[in-house]
Amino acid sequence: MTNTQSIFYIPSVNLFGPGSVNEVGTRLAGLGVKKALLVTDAGLHGLGLSEKIASIIREAGVEVLIFPKAEPNPTDKNVAEGLEVYNAENCDSIVTLGGGSSHDAGKGIALVAANGGTIYDYEGVDKSKKPMVPLIAINTTAGTGSELTRFTIITDTERKVKMAIVDKHVTPTLSINDPELMVGMPPSLTAATGLDALTHAIEAYVSTAATPITDALAIQAIKIISKYLPRAFANGKDMEAREQMAFAQSLAGMAFNNASLGYVHAIAHQFGGFYNFPHGVCNAILLPHVCRFNLISKVERFAEIAALLGENVAGLSTREAAEKGIKAIERMAKDLNIPRGFKELGAKEEDIVTLAENAMKDATALTNPRKPKLEEVIQIIKNAM
């Protein structure tokens, strides 16, 4: 028994299953709001999906204005522009539609709308005083887990750093995971978001803040992802695989929302902020390298991860099993056509020290199971280049 207290954060209502998005209007109306800002990206808007969702909302008697300007790796400028529109149009709620970028941009807008100031004021842990305005998050990827977490990651464009905002007040009011909205994801996005979810589960499982509750969530997420992510990648219309991945990414999101993360995310945030690289791809590249660094601190857990990934570990020592699990992660990334290293994406050796220094300041580094020195973080990044 420990003297440490733990808190479990999650939206109070979470909808799953085909057709669940059709409830967004009645759920929003039930919150007593009058006008919502629908935050999405240009791609989904161009496909007409945002207008479809807006129609469902209007049918429930709620006005809605579409803001289709969420960028990949959303920025402080995204938040500021969205907030200006939110206030000018007298909105009183937000709906986000998309993956992590739309959700994070919307949560940033909602947080500042309720608390005032600028998004920079909320970098760190629990800096806000008030709950954000009502927010319903509709997910289209599997995934970042942002639709149900207290995390929002916003790029500071001047510093070229991703600000990690970890705040109980950015937990969405309600989340919707409808697998029918995920069928259109191309294989590359399926791979990147799926390995992002795997990273969430693994980092939560080896986190210093892990609990039996987060362990149960992470274990199930790893098992489901191992089985269904390759299927969803191979055939995007495999509805069983899409639905199972929607559950898996939610389980992983709940796990890391409460156990937090580690140096995969701490470093990935820097590559995303500095170069604007896709977050899921950054995590996928870094995951085996950070796992190798962390192995000696949680060798039993990494051995368990190997078995959860479907590896036969019978007759192996704990260390051998753990190393086999890391090789399985590398093999999955290769099967899903993830780049082998950051040089393929355009990263430069001369930036490594800056990236490492900033990673050590990232909020997600606090719960990494092994505490690195600067030169060790530099070496992890070099290994991942």
Image (cartoon, grey):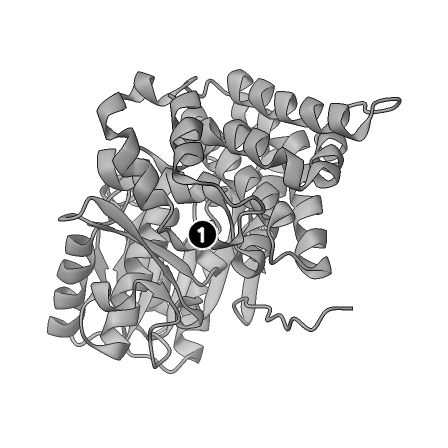
In the depicted structure, whether residue 45 falls above or below residue 375: below
Front residue of this view, candidates 182 and 309: 309
Q: Quadrant of the C terminus?
A: top left
Q: Quadrant of residue 312?
A: top right
**Would residue 241 be found to the left or right of residue 315 on screen?**
left
In the depicted structure, whether residue 320 falls above or below residue 195: above
Q: Return the x and y of residue 320 as percentages of the image width and height.
A: 75, 23
Q: Residue at x 37, y 51 (%)?
A: 362
Q: Residues within 10 Å of mark 1 (few under 14, many from 20)?
A: many
Q: Secondary structure at mark 1?
A: helix
Q: Return the x and y of residue 380 as percentages of the image width and height.
A: 44, 29
Q: Quadrant of residue 297?
A: top right
Say if residue 340 shows up in the picture.
yes
Q: Residue at x 26, y 46 (%)?
A: 41
**Would residue 23 be found to the left or right of residue 272 on screen?**
right
Front residue of this view, candidates 225 and 75: 75
Q: Return the x and y of residue 6 as percentages of the image width and height.
A: 62, 70
Q: Which residue is mark 1?
A: 364
**Would residue 8 be found to the left or right of residue 95 on screen?**
right
Tell me the amino acid under the disc marked 1.
Thr
Q: Residue at x 31, y 42 (%)?
A: 357
